[in-house]
Amino acid sequence: MKSQYAVIGLGRFGASISKELVQLGNEVLGIDKDEEAVDEMSSELTHTVVADATDEDVLKSLGIRNFDCAVVAIGDDIQSSILAAIVLKDLGVKKVVAKALSELHGKVLDKIGVDRVIYPERDMGIRVAHQLVSPNLLDYIEISKDYTIAELSVPKRICGLSIRELDPRAKYGCSVVAINKKTGVIIAPTATDVVNEKDIMVIIGTNDQIEEFENEVIG
C-alpha cells in the first residue's frame, strides 16, 4: 500500500526527500509559502499547495491528520519550523519528522515531541569524515545514539572466509546483516556464507565494535 507523506518546505532538502519518496512509490503533498518553489515541484509530486504550515486551520483544511507522516523541512526559519512541528503534533499526525539546523533547534524539536529529528549537514559531515579515514568504509549511518550501520568493502586478505570463521558477533559484538555480491544481496547471511574480494558487508553494532572489527579484520 502507498503511504501518504506531507513535506513542508520545498527547498533543496525538502525537494530531495519529496522526489525520493515519490520514486519509492508513495504519495506526497508538498507545502511551501513560496509560490515559485511550489510551481517547480508541481509536476514532480502527487499534490502541491502554496500555504503557511504554521497556520492550524490551513493544515486542518488539507486533511493533514490523515497523512502517515509529515516532514518539516523548512530551510532557515527556526521559528516557523518549531511552530509547524507543534501544530502537526497538536493535530495528531501519526509521525512527525523534522530537520534541525543546530543542536539547540534539535533539542527544542525533541521537547515538543517530534518523532525523529534529522541533522542533514552534521550527519553528512560525520559520514564523510569516516569515509575519509577508512578507505574500506563505503557508508556509515548512525541509527541511534548507540548503534551504527556500516558498509565495508571486503579486502583480499579475508577473501574465501565464511561468516563462521570471521565470527564477528562472538569476537567483536557486531553482526553481518547482509552481503552485497555481484550476483545479488544475501540478507541475514548464515554461518556458512562466504565473503569474496570486493563484496560489501553490511554490519550493525556500536561504533566501538565496528571500529574494532574494521581495524582487526578488514585492516
Image (spheres, rainbow, N blue to C red):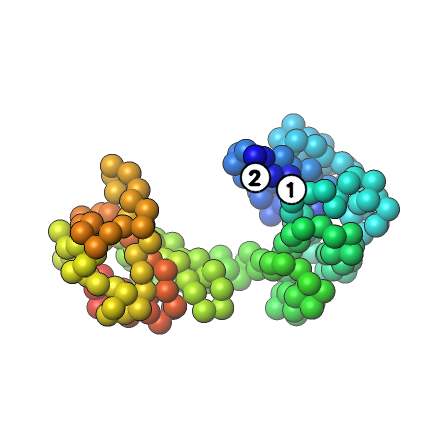
Residue at position x 79%, y 39% in the image: 62
Residue in front for this viewpoint, 169 or 46: 169
To which residue does mark 2 refer?
A: 21
Occupied quadrant, residue 86: bottom right
| Labels 2 & 1 near each other (Cβ < 8 A) | yes
Q: Is residue 188 found left or right of 56 in the rendered image?
A: left
Amino acid beneath label 2: Leu
Q: Single out the residue that lies furthest toward the right.
A: 57
Q: Position of residue 100 (x, y in %)?
A: 63, 60
Q: Position of residue 9 (x, y in %)?
A: 69, 46
Q: Secondary structure at mark 1?
A: strand
Q: Position of residue 12 (x, y in %)?
A: 61, 45
* Label whose residue precedes the other's in the sequence (2 or 1): 1
Amino acid beneath label 1: Tyr
Q: Is residue 139 found left or right of 155 in the rendered image?
A: right
Residue at position x 70%, y 46% in the image: 8
Q: Give the quadrant of the C terminus.
A: bottom left
Q: Residues within 10 Å of mark 1 (few under 14, many from 20)?
A: many
To which residue does mark 1 refer?
A: 5
Is residue 3 visible in the rendered structure shown here? yes
Residue at position x 46%, y 61% in the image: 142
Q: Residues within 10 Å of mark 2 (few under 14, many from 20)?
A: some
Residue in front for this viewpoint, 24 or 75: 24
Q: Secondary structure at mark 2?
A: helix
On screen, residue 88 above or below 212: above
* Cα gap from disc 2 to disc 1, whole angstroms: 8 Å
